[in-house]
Image: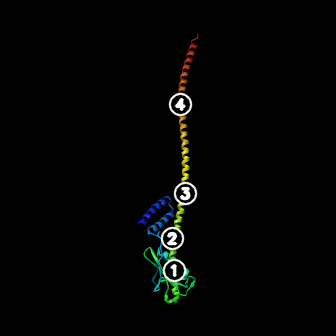
Amino acid sequence: MIKIFFALNFYVVLKQLTNVTNMPCLKKFFAVTAAVLISGSVIAQTVKVKKETARVKGENLEGYEVALEGSYESIQESFSKLLKTIGKVKTADDGIIVNEPSVNGLAYKQPLLAITKEKGTTGGAAWIGIKASDWPKEDAEKINKELEKILKDYGIKFYRDKIQVQVDESTRASLAVDKQKQKLTNENKSLNTKLEDNKREKIQLEKSLETNKLENETLLKKLEKNKHDQDSVTLAGDQIKKVVEMHKERQRKVN
């Protein structure tokens, strides 16, 4: 329940991040991490190697097996790489032969035998051993001890490499988040600067508007006075014209 609760909370946080950033690397990181959390892979894994009989080349042989969580293809690929570091690998449907193996600095004439197995849908196993009847007893005892250690080291490396992929993915996601965070911080500074400029412009416009209002009132008063003055002048002009006509009339009446 705790794992599921933590995973769900993690889902909410990552969902918010991907909505804000729309970055593919975060979406991939979210998918991988959610799967890890739900599966419980955050708990330290212990590699266990056990003695196991396997059917190889038509025979039941004793050897060592390690069960692993991961895709069968990844187990096949990583185990094949390991075997190639030990000797000359020849792969067939019924098993893998490692000719001329060299283990811990010692070369052997007899081959090692190996196979991989599918286990369910989320895991598999790697097996390695020898056909004891083909080996000198002393060499067989010595190589068996080495094979158990080789398989143990292989299992540890398999999980560490698998986790490293998740570490790399997480690191890329972290860098992407830091980059996006810096971008948003810069955007925030820019927006605040624009807001302050807008405030100053608003104050200036308000002052200009007040000045404009006063000028408007002054102009209205001047227009009103001008109209009054025009009316006064017109009236005075009419009176003067009457006086002029009166004088002219008096002038005509002089004998």
Query: In the picture, residue 102 is in which quadrant?
Result: bottom right
* Mark positioned earlier in the residue sequence (2 or 3): 2
- Mark 1 or 4: in front is 1
Q: Residue at x 54, y 60 (%)?
A: 178
* Mark positioned earlier in the residue sequence (3 or 1): 1
* Mark positioned earlier in the residue sequence (4 or 3): 3
Crowdedness of circle 4 by 10 Å Cα count: few (<14), some, many (20+)?
Answer: few
Inter-mark Cα distance, 2 to 3: 30 Å
Residue type at mark 3 is Lys
* Helix, strand or loop for disc 1: helix
* Mark positioned earlier in the residue sequence (2 or 4): 2
Tell me if residue 56 comes above or below residue 157 in the rendering. Answer: below
Question: Where does the N terminus fall, quadrant-wise?
Answer: bottom left
Give the numbered dot on residue 16: none
Tell me if residue 44 comes above or below residue 216 in the rendering. Answer: below
Give the numbered dot on residue 149: 1
Residue 216, percent across and down? 53, 35
User: Closer to the camera, 120 or 246?
Assistant: 120
Q: Which residue is mark 3?
A: 183
Residue type at mark 4 is Lys
Q: Which residue is mark 4?
A: 221
Inter-mark Cα distance, 1 to 2: 21 Å
Crowdedness of circle 1 by 10 Å Cα count: few (<14), some, many (20+)?
Answer: some
- Mark 2 or 3: in front is 2
* Mark positioned earlier in the residue sequence (1 or 4): 1
Inter-mark Cα distance, 4 to 3: 56 Å
- Mark 4 or 3: in front is 3
Residue 214 seen in render: yes
